[in-house]
Image: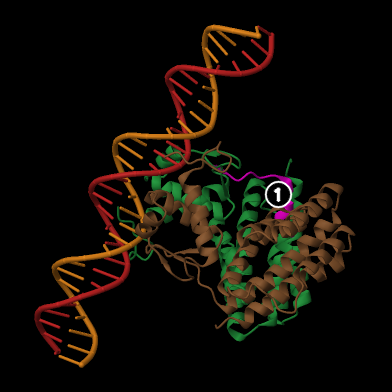
Chain colours: A green, B brown, C orange, D red
Amino acid sequence: MNMIDDTGVKETSATRTAYVSLREMILTGALPAGQKLKIEQLRGLLNTGASPVREALSLLTSDMLVERIDQRGFRAAPANKANFEEILALRCTLEDLALRQSIANADADWEERLVLTHHHMKKAAQQEAAIFEEAHKTFHMALLANSGSPMLEKFCAQLYDLNIRYRYLAAKSSIYPGRDVPAEHEEILDAAVKRDADRASAKLLSHYRLTGEYLSRDMQN
Amino acid sequence: MNMIDDTGVKETSATRTAYVSLREMILTGALPAGQKLKIEQLRGLLNTGASPVREALSLLTSDMLVERIDQRGFRAAPANKANFEEILALRCTLEDLALRQSIANADADWEERLVLTHHHMKKAAQQEAAIFEEAHKTFHMALLANSGSPMLEKFCAQLYDLNIRYRYLAAKSSIYPGRDVPAEHEEILDAAVKRDADRASAKLLSHYRLTGEYLSRDMQN
DNA sequence: ATGTCAATAAATATCGATATTTTGGTGAGG
DNA sequence: CCTCACCAAAATATCGATATTTATTGACAT
């Protein structure tokens, strides 16, 4: 089996392919939270062998998107309001820290990359949702990318992904009435570029918390 | 293959057995940092099949104790001074947070468990190192166990384990001249039980930072 | 000498089959 | 009518073998 990637040059392992697909399915809700993930069933869905599926599920465990039950297989991580609020709170704490460190270590490279990823995100706004999602994450991670602490950044990226999932769960409401999201991004960017840590952090956190309120509203338990 | 555990009653999966063994070997340095981990070689060492070994390595990846190189197998996570200091800093931030939340939510159950685990740790001081290590971790995790944020606790536990590794790396120096470690633990316990968050956190952090200084001294790069 | 390339050796990734374990249901006994 | 032990059926975990991929070596041309 030879898989060709975008550039038409390289190959991917079956495990990685399965990993990417399953991750996407869990994030978007194609595999509902809490659902039992049977190897056979997934093997069919992705048409690949059982070993790659098992390994992909193991990898997703690291991301806290899948839970392994010791002799009883895997299931998609459960989702509920308490978990959502935990993620939001942790995200605010850790991203605040990472952003402040990034600004403290600010240099031209970081600043330029910020401007660039923000530009890409603006252009992607017209494109389909998946493209914009990707650009949005890239911008937000670029904000934190100068913290000097790879682990901190990894934690933030993990929490970011877990949050995406809840955005898809409260699906319809990716429109936020009475809110100018692009303006919020501009403000964060502007404060970061000006190296105003307090303002950047305040804007970033309120950006997250606002979205959190909208989502909380459309969430049952 | 039927493995009987301590109690002589239950069984474990081969994967879990391999996971526990490999984790131990990496933490204690039996498998040196940065070393290539060949499946065949480990299969022999643990006398089990290749599948459990692969899966155990995948699981260890979640713990950041093993790195997976895409089509090129696994290796023990590298260790260096920068990484050590990153862990120490993150630990201080996250444990400070978790401890304060635990104290804010303090109740009788938590308090009693604290006293109990501290007692066990004191008794374990005479026993062999591995026993004490276990009790020491249990005590420290009990301090954080009331934070109300399972993920935060998970991050702390992960960082705790990563730190153990550096203690073994600077092996000989598990004696800390001019330091009364048991007294430090008493102070942390006392402050926590009295629900004095500021004092508890200060004592906890200085406990970690002191050890950090000793370890930093015996570390080359 | 030195760098490139092909052939070989080693290691990883994947498959298909088998052995264990869990689950859910059924009937005997209380 | 409920409880518990037991028996399929389903699912997971594990093995052994094979197909791919990466690393190494040595010959050959420059």
A88 within the magenta span:
yes
Residue B35 is covered by the magenta coloring: no
- Give how far across and how far down residue B145 sits, in percent: 75, 54
Side (left or right) of A157 relative to D21:
right
The span shown in magenta is A74-89
Vertical side of D24 occupied by B68: above or below = above
| Residue B134 on image: x %, y % | 65, 57
| For residue B145, above or below residue C10 | above
Residue at image location 51% in from the left, 48% down from the top = B16
Q: Is residue A86 left or right of residue A30?
A: right
Q: Nearer the viewer, residue C2 or A163?
A: C2
Looking at the rendered structure, the kind of residue marked 1 is Asn
Q: Residue at x 67, y 79 (%)?
A: B214
Instruction: Note whether A113 is above or below B137 in the view shown.
Output: below
Asked if one can make out residue A122 in the rendered structure from this viewpoint, the answer is no
Q: Nearer the viewer, residue A92 or A134?
A: A92
The residue sitting at 56% across, 73% down in the picture is B169
**For this view, does A133 lie left or right of residue B115?**
left
**Secondary structure type for disc 1:** helix
Which residue position is annotated with label 1? A83
> As rendered, which of A133 and B48 lies closer to the eye?
B48
Q: Is residue C19 left or right of residue B101?
A: left
